[in-house]
Image: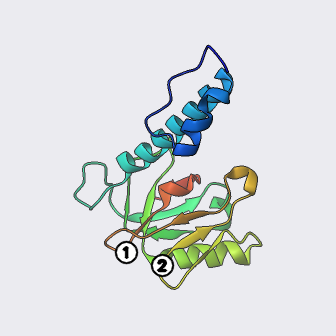
Amino acid sequence: MNDNNLPVPDWASHVLRRTWSNLSPDDQRALIDDHEQAALRDLDIQLRRTTSPDSLGARPSGDFTLDGFVHNRMRWHAERFEEPWNGWATPVVTRATLENLVEDLTRLGSAPGHIADEGICTVFRDADDDGNFDITPDADGLYHLFELGWCFIALP
């Protein structure tokens, strides 16, 4: 048993509570840090998400592309843009636009994901990058592409 234990977090499962004292202080800190980082990422997504075109963070509609695709003139339409992320555009798109984006990138040899019949878009990622990621449409049927973490560019 370790005398330098951190207190058991209130969010810990029953299994984690039972084994907490067997973990090293470094392992305890790593678990707490991982949980806090996940919570911060979720909060960041929620804060950037605009719920309507009238939200303070919303920007007018327009076309966008991906960084590295400007040269081949590939572009898609956003219904609106959310608050920029690290200087990158954050498009909000319809299902049709998302389908076009996935199809276009697949044709170029980089299948980014799949859109299921119920509308969930599964983005393929390496297991090292936390595995596949799902994006669900909001209540208006729009997809907030900020969640992808891709580098989008708003076009004039």
* Front residue (pair 5, 65): 5
Residue 22 position, x and y percent, is 67, 29
Picture layout, residue 46 above or below residue 117? above
Callout 1 crowding tier (Cα within 10 Å): few <14, some 14–19, many ≥20: few
For the point 67% across and 68% down, the residue is 112
Q: Quadrant for the C terminus, please.
A: bottom left
Picture layout, residue 55 above or below residue 17? below
For the point 63% across and 30% down, the residue is 30
For the point 62% across and 27% down, the residue is 21
Q: Is residue 72 left or right of residue 149?
A: right
Residue 114 in sight from this viewpoint: yes
Q: Quadrant for the N terminus, please.
A: top right
Residue furthest right in the image:
109
Callout 2 crowding tier (Cα within 10 Å): few <14, some 14–19, many ≥20: some
Of the image marks 1 and 2, the number of the one nearer the N terminus: 2
Picture layout, residue 95 above or below residue 1? below
Q: Secondary structure at mark 2?
A: loop
* Front residue (pair 25, 136): 25
Give the label on residue 119, or none: 2
Give the label on residue 141, or none: 1
The answer to the question of whether label 1 and label 2 lie on touching residues, with beta carbons closer than 8 A, is: yes
Q: Amino acid at mark 2?
A: Gly
Residue 32 position, x and y percent, is 55, 32
For the residues labelled 1 and 2, the Cα–Cα distance comes to 8 Å
Residue 154 in sight from this viewpoint: no
What's the coloring here? Answer: rainbow
Give the label on residue 106, or none: none
Q: Amino acid at mark 1?
A: Gly
* Front residue (pair 106, 20): 20
**Count the marks: how many?**
2
Q: Secondary structure at mark 1?
A: loop
